[in-house]
Amino acid sequence: MQTPHKEHLYKLLVIGDLGVGKTSIIKRYVHQNFSSHYRATIGVDFALKVLHWDPETVVRLQLWDIAGQERFGNMTRVYYREAMGAFIVFDVTRPATFEAVAKWKNDLDSKLTLPNGKPVSVVLLANKCDQGKDVLMNNGLKMDQFCKEHGFVGWFETSAKENINIDEASRCLVKHILANE
Ligand code: GDP
Ligand code: MG
């Protein structure tokens, strides 16, 4: 068996308004479970996900979860520092959380750029798509346009509850990060 010869460690941020499902998405992705009773974490949590990207490449994702601070709608530079990518999450059942997306993106871009000066790759997650209250998503074109205008590399309807599209969204983000290096 050949041993992998490329190893990457990426810090990824998961940001967005309170209650949109950031912690749930990380739990689902890393621990394959879901609970409807998460306590709001205090401070910053980390979770590690290891991807065997291809036969020669291992990608380690260090996912940074925030808790508490998201109610202020912005984060400190220290938190953003050296991140290589991010997910910005909103809740499809709560339009106000979508309205906050551009604000999160601006906060990120104003405090963080890659060593090469480019903005970091960000994927937009329309979470809780299992709820059937999809007020925003029935217009894929509009979302594509929104992503283009705001500099997202892609968007996915996700459900942490039903495990929909989380792996796909992560692969999309990692693909863009690898392409940027
Ligand atoms: P955070 O504040 O962004 O970290 O949000 P949480 O992960 O704590 O989730 C807030 C609430 O939404 C919790 O009650 C979760 O169980 C629920 N939740 C999170 N993701 C989903 C989802 O995909 N579908 C549904 N139906 N509920 C979800
Ligand atoms: Mg949380």
Image (cartoon, rainbow, N blue to C red):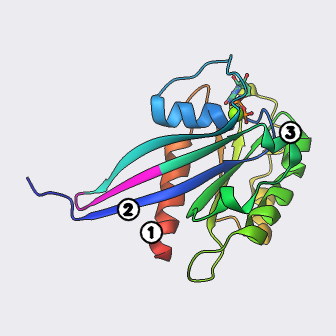
* Circle 3 SS class: loop
Q: Is residue 113 visible?
A: yes
Q: Position of residue 170 (x, y in %)?
A: 52, 51
Q: Which residue is mark 2?
A: 8
Observer-side mark, 3 or 1, equals 1
* Circle 2 SS class: strand
Q: Residue at x 86, y 39 (%)?
A: 135
Whether the residues at callouts 2 and 3 have beta carbons within 8 Å, the answer is: no
Task: Estimate the spatial distance between the alpha carbons at disc 2 and disc 1, rounded to whole Å.
Answer: 9 Å
Magenta span includes 39: no
For disc 1, the neighbor class at 10 Å (few under 14, some 14 to 19, many from 20) is few
Amino acid type indicated by mark 1: Leu
Task: Estimate the spatial distance between the alpha carbons at disc 3 and disc 1, rounded to whole Å.
Answer: 34 Å
Depth check: 15 or 170 in front? Answer: 15
Magenta span includes 57: yes
Whether the residues at callouts 2 and 1 have beta carbons within 8 Å, the answer is: yes
User: Which quarter is ligand 2 in?
Assistant: top right
Q: Residue at x 46, y 76 (%)?
A: 181
Amino acid type indicated by mark 3: Val
Marks 2 and 3, the one that precedes in the sequence: 2
Q: Which residues are magenta?
A: 55-61
Q: Which residue is mark 1?
A: 178
Depth check: 101 or 82 in front? Answer: 82
State the mark number for residue 135. 3
